[in-house]
Image (spheres, rainbow, N blue to C red):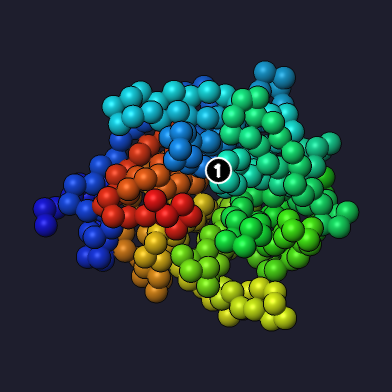
Amino acid sequence: MEDVNSSVWKIHDDSFRQIIGVNPSLELLLSVEAYPFAHEAGVFLPSTKELFITSNQFIGHDGKKKVQISKVSLGDENATPMREEVDCIDIQMGNGAVNDQDSILFCAQGSMTAPSGLFRMSSLPPYKTEAVLTSFYGRPFNSVNDIVISKDGCIWFTDPIYGFEQGYRPPPSLPNQVYRYDPKTSSVRAVADNFGRPNGLCFSPDEAILYVTDTDQVHGDGSINPSRCSTIYAFDVIYRNDQPFLSNRRLFAFADVGIPDGIKCDMDGNVYSGCGDGVNVWSPGGVLLGRILVDGGVANFCFGQSGELFILNEFRLWKAQLNSSVRGALLKI
């Protein structure tokens, strides 16, 4: 097999070559210098070839911190992507998001006056929005960060205290935890604790394992301490009395550059995470297989179709083309 560009594709294990294929590519799709438009979420809609993303925080025209939701229309292979800013006042400081049938389920980190929680937004104008969950039995969430929906329709999400540390949320009223919400019964449970800053989460393809990133190395006040967690944990999903529990917590991987933020699996169970040097990929056994190197690092990303990977790099949106046989576990396309 021909050598690939080592400045983009860092191979640690030969099996990474099967993932990236014989002719991988990294293409810049969009660049916006006004603000860091490509930070989190990353929700691909295959029916319309659209991508919904959230920006990093920036100062708006009113002098206050804000996060901007964008819709990127990708079009056909040779089309120029078009970006539209989506105004949705109900989703304050949006962050992670996930496909929810024909809609999108967003994490709203909230503000001093607006709640943090889960909000469903239509993917079509005028982008009608409804609140799904905004408290833990009346106790306000801290700043809900990332989200995934299991095959039974239940919603799993993380809730670190970043909003308070960054000055736009009240003092925490809950620990740094992972939660599960069942829309059918309106039951919400704390399912994992003892994190520094729980962040990204995803299931293995068979949903037998839940992966959770702990980004405690970087606190919301900007302090960085290399002795704190920059870690992906794995949990077994077991059932007791017909309810799922997380057990057998174990350190799955430690990110050596920056923090492991957003996280996804492919259908072979390989684990991808946005890190300080790009997208890192581990085998299901926790072996670092390789990296897609992106200057400035990656907070989040999502799979498209047939080996596409849309990479959010703050002021830039990239598309990596992996082996066309690669499928993301979320959409399985």
Image side of residue 175 versus residue 148, left or right = right
Furthest-right residue in this view:
138
Of the residues shown, which amino acid type is indicated by label 1?
Answer: Ala
* Residue at 70%, 77% in the rendered image: 242
Secondary structure of the residue carrying numbered label 1 = strand
x and y percentages locating residue 202 in the rendered image: 53, 60
Image side of residue 161 versus residue 122, left or right = right
Whether residue 266 is situated above or below residue 210 in the rendered picture: above
Quadrant location of residue 97? top right
71 or 201: nearer the eye? 71
Whether residue 302 is situated above or below residue 15 in the rendered picture: above
* Residue at 58%, 80% in the rendered image: 248
Whether residue 310 is situated above or below residue 175 in the rendered picture: above
Quadrant location of residue 125? top right
x and y percentages locating residue 286 in the rendered image: 41, 71
Q: Which residue is mark 1?
A: 41
Q: Is residue 96 visible?
A: no
Whether residue 71 is situated above or below residue 310 in the rendered picture: above
x and y percentages locating residue 94 in the rendered image: 65, 39
Q: Is residue 332 visible?
A: yes
Furthest-top residue in this view:
61
* Residue at 50%, 46% in the rendered image: 299
185 or 159: nearer the eye? 185
113 or 7: nearer the eye? 113
For mark 1, does the 10 Å Cα neighbourhood hold few (<14), some (14 to 19), or many (20 or more) residues?
Answer: many
Quarter occupied by the N terminus: bottom left
